[in-house]
Image: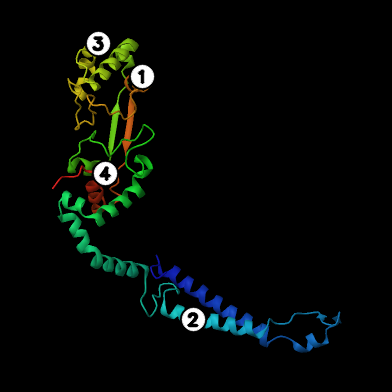
């Protein structure tokens, strides 16, 4: 209330507040002390107690109203409420926030510095930090990746296996969480036709099963797919191109799933969390998701 845009509005609010209080005081006083008792006594009475005119509310209402008025005046003296007047206690929301932030920094700075200055393996060995990281994961990541982090709906990757599309290093995982990722697999149906799609599916399945005797579709693969996935299908974390030589499939390994992937393409978006989580939380999540380093 004290931070008003102009003195005009501050003065206008002050006048309205004071006039409203004075009007309320006059209303209460007129009801209890200025009522025409003689007219009330001379009014007709029906059914023994029912009469015209009005009687004031019970006196305890008057005392309750008086106490409320006194507390209102005291409040307006101590705290902001009258335009730009900040109150004798000089209280403000900004001041309260600054005080809370100062208290927070004083209480938690050592713990935050511990998280920033320790290695990932040290953080992984700290059960309290890992429990906190798990709660952060459940609040922010579980909606897509599942509470256990093993992915779901054939749309969101398993974070508990050894397959990392963008790399499993500390920097790569930190980058994924903080800035997000956008993966684009283009559709190849127009370029290679239905027969070419079928041949690439057979070749990719052979790669995943380590069957080096099946070369059907190899030429098409090397001409169109190797630029991202590599000549041997080993993938490229820099481009977010997954490894095709393992048996891990984000969208499934059925013929229908592979036709959709190769013929029509896929798009995957990992949103950035840099505005939702701070550096400490992102580092804790990084430690939670990284493969545990044996001591």
Q: Measure the alpha-carbon separation of dots 2 and 4.
A: 52 Å
Identify the residue at image location x=43%, y=80%: 77
Closer to the observer: label 3 or label 2?
3
Residue bearing the label numbered 1: 255
| Callouts 1 and 2 close, C-beta under 8 Å | no
Q: Estimate how packed mark 3 is, as few (under 14), some (14 to 19) or many (20 or more) residues with alpha carbons within 10 Å.
A: some
Position above or below: 146 against 101: above
Among all residues in the image, which is located at the extreme front? 295
Q: Earlier in the sequence, mark 3 or mark 1?
A: 3
Residue identifier under label 4: 177
- C-alpha distance separating marks 3 and 2: 89 Å
Residue 33 versus residue 93 in the image, above or below: below
Instruction: Residue under label 3, please give it.
Output: 216
Residue 3 visible in image: yes
Label 4 crowd (10 A; few <14 / some 14-19 / many >=20):
many
- Which numbered disc, 1 or 2, marks the residue closer to the eye? 1
Say few, some or many: other residues with alpha carbon within 10 Å of mark 2 (under 14 / 14 to 19 / 20 or more).
Answer: few
Residue on which disc 2 sits: 73
Q: Are marks 4 and 3 in contact (CB under 8 Å)?
A: no
């Amino acid at each position: 209330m004290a931070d008003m845009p102009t003195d005009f509005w501050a003065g206008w609010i002050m006048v309205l507040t004071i006039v409203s209080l004075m009007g309320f005081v006059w209303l209460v006083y007129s009801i209890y002390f200025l009522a025409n008792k003689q007219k009330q006594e001379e009014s007709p009475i029906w059914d023994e107690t029912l009469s015209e005119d009005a009687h004031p509310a019970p006196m305890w209402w008057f005392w309750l109203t008086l106490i409320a008025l006194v507390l209102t005046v005291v409040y307006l003296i101590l705290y902001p409420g009258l335009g730009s007047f900040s109150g004798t206690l000089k209280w403000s929301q900004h001041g309260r926030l600054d005080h809370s932030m100062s208290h927070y920094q004083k209480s938690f700075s050592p713990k935050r510095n511990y998280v920033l200055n320790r290695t990932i393996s040290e953080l992984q060995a700290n059960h309290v930090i890992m429990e906190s990281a798990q709660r952060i994961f459940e609040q922010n990541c579980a909606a897509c990746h599942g509470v256990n982090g093993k992915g779901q709906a054939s749309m969101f990757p398993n974070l508990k296996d050894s397959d990392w599309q963008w790399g499993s290093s500390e920097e790569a995982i930190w980058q994924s969480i903080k800035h997000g990722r956008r993966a684009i697999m283009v559709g190849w149906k127009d370029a290679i036709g239905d027969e070419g799609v079928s041949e690439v599916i057979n070749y990719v399945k052979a790669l995943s099963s380590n069957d080096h005797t099946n070369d059907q579709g190899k030429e098409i693969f090397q001409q169109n797919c190797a630029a991202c996935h590599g000549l041997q299908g080993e993938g490229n974390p820099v481009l977010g191109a997954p490894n095709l030589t393992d048996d891990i499939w984000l969208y499934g390994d059925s013929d229908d799933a592979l036709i959709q992937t190769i013929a029509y393409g896929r798009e995957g978006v990992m949103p950035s969390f840099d505005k939702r989580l701070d550096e400490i939380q992102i580092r804790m999540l990084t430690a939670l998701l990284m493969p545990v380093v044996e001591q």
